[in-house]
Image (cartoon, rainbow, N blue to C red):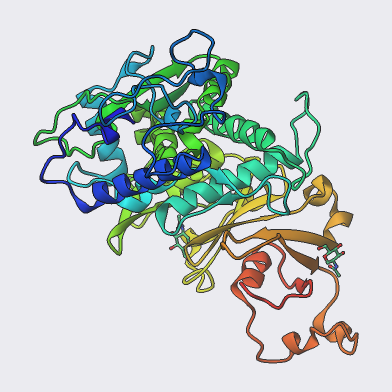
Amino acid sequence: VDMEVSSQEPSPPELNLEEITRKITFLDRWREIFSYHRLGTNNATPQDHEGYPAAADQAGDGTGTPPPREQGRWPSGSLPSIPRPSVISSASAGSPISRAVATKLQQSLFGNTAHVFSHDWKRAHFQFRSPFSDLAFALEVEKGGPRSIQMAVQAAIVKYLLFPRKGEDRHPHSLCDLSRQQQEQALAAVLTDILWASGAAQKAVVCLVTEDTYVAGATDYSRDDFTERLQLFEFSEKEAAEKFIRDHSQCFRGEGSCGVLLFLFSLILSRTFERLQKDLDATTSHLLQPSAGGFLCRQALLNLILTGRASPHVFNGCEQGKAQEPLHGVLARSEVGYLQWGEGTSTGDRSSQVGSMLKTPACPVWLCNISGKCSVLFCTNRQLLSDWKAERVFHLLFYSGQPLQKRPLHLTVDTHSHPWERDGRGDGREDGLSPGRRFSPLEMVIRTKWREATISWNKTGPLF
Ligand SMILES: *[C@@H]1O[C@H](CO)[C@@H](O)[C@H](O)[C@H]1NC(C)=O
Ligand SMILES: *[C@@H]1O[C@H](CO)[C@@H](O)[C@H](O)[C@H]1NC(C)=O
């Protein structure tokens, strides 16, 4: 924070556009804070500091006197209301990233060290919609690559809120009746769960970003002004990891925190490079793929979040490729499942068919990949997948991540009625079943699991 407003930090002439945008966003944030405290930008001296929490009393004399302002800058820590903590102090007890680890991270992500993350990745973080709202459980999501990660985490959040594990001392939450604190708690618990599973239930590594740079650029490493500022914190107890993430949740959900990248790096380091290599196969050597100037997640990365293993394929178990090479699919049922619909799904390319393990998870929550775009589908009835009677007619809720979506979409799935029996029932949707009707992609993705199911839309038409 200091660095950015400090007049003592001359701006390097070669500022790139991304950095400028970052600085402008940053200044906007200051402006907001100033106006919040009624410290209009024309009024350089704070007259009215009532808005300051006691911590602003940096002088420590209990008078709450705002600290003296040095020329052109605020002394560090003088404005505790600034969302500063997304950058931690370099003096923290973690270990600074080494050049070897930074290089390997780039290789596991991009397959080489020539790429760096684009702005959309750096901008992405884990921010909930408004507390106590119909979408209080929901994260705001980006476009492109980071969206897949946010949605995979979203699926885990839904699972966490609706279906506490046996022995977990926690009642199921309502999805809308969540305070900001409960949202933060859920995020910390879910990120920990995912990192812990990725660390084979033995350890979790959490990365946070500091002010200092530990790795200089060189031919075998591309600087991105992020990776080289990481500190790594390793935990061999899950509770400790969760407490640490909760204490630093601002680092994952704050604007400008690069929360999704921090989570992604923590995920790979928790998995370890050795295990990651064993998970992958001849078809996939790294986790992201370039697309339209950005980077998209490969299946192995989604599977790592869903199952704790970076299996590149969605079928059950292992299969053999054309050259008899082993292809790695999913080895066990996970808590959250996965459904996919898009080009190629219908044309029967076997290796792209989602296997029963991902289709039938322990809890009725699925990450859906509809033509490469991720969303979440779930049922609030835990019995859905364990009691066949529950599967005759049931309700599903759908969160698309579209900013305009105000509440989960409500679908009724009927696996027993047949189109010809429904004729004339007058629910206004028969037109949808007339010959030649094209099913919407959301209906198709549901039908990859419940074949022939009829799906009715509550009030809204098939928007997705
Ligand atoms: C999502 O689905 C598309 C097909 O629609 C597929 O090409 C892609 O590999 C899937 N996985 C991810 C992670 O996008
Ligand atoms: C429509 O949605 C509301 C809640 O949004 C639900 O209570 C109701 O049962 C749904 N109706 C049908 C027919 O699915």
The front one of 220 and 80 is 80
Q: Quadrant of the C terminus?
A: bottom right
The front one of 165 and 356 is 165
* Left or right of 326, for residue 215: left
Relative height, residue 236 to residue 33 (above, below): above
* Left or right of 303, for residue 289: left
Relative height, residue 394 to residue 285 (above, below): below
Q: Quadrant of the N terminus?
A: top left
Residue at (49% x, 30% y) in the render: 81
Q: Position of residue 231 (x, y in %)?
A: 34, 22
Q: Position of residue 370 (x, y in %)?
A: 54, 65
Q: Quadrant of residue 70?
A: top left
Q: Is residue 107 visible?
A: yes
Relative height, residue 237 to residue 84 (above, below): above
Q: Quadrant of residue 232?
A: top left
Q: Quadrant of residue 29?
A: top left
Q: Is residue 312 visible?
A: no
Q: Position of residue 186 (x, y in %)?
A: 65, 34
Residue at (71% x, 42% y) in the render: 362
Residue at (48% x, 38% y) in the render: 254
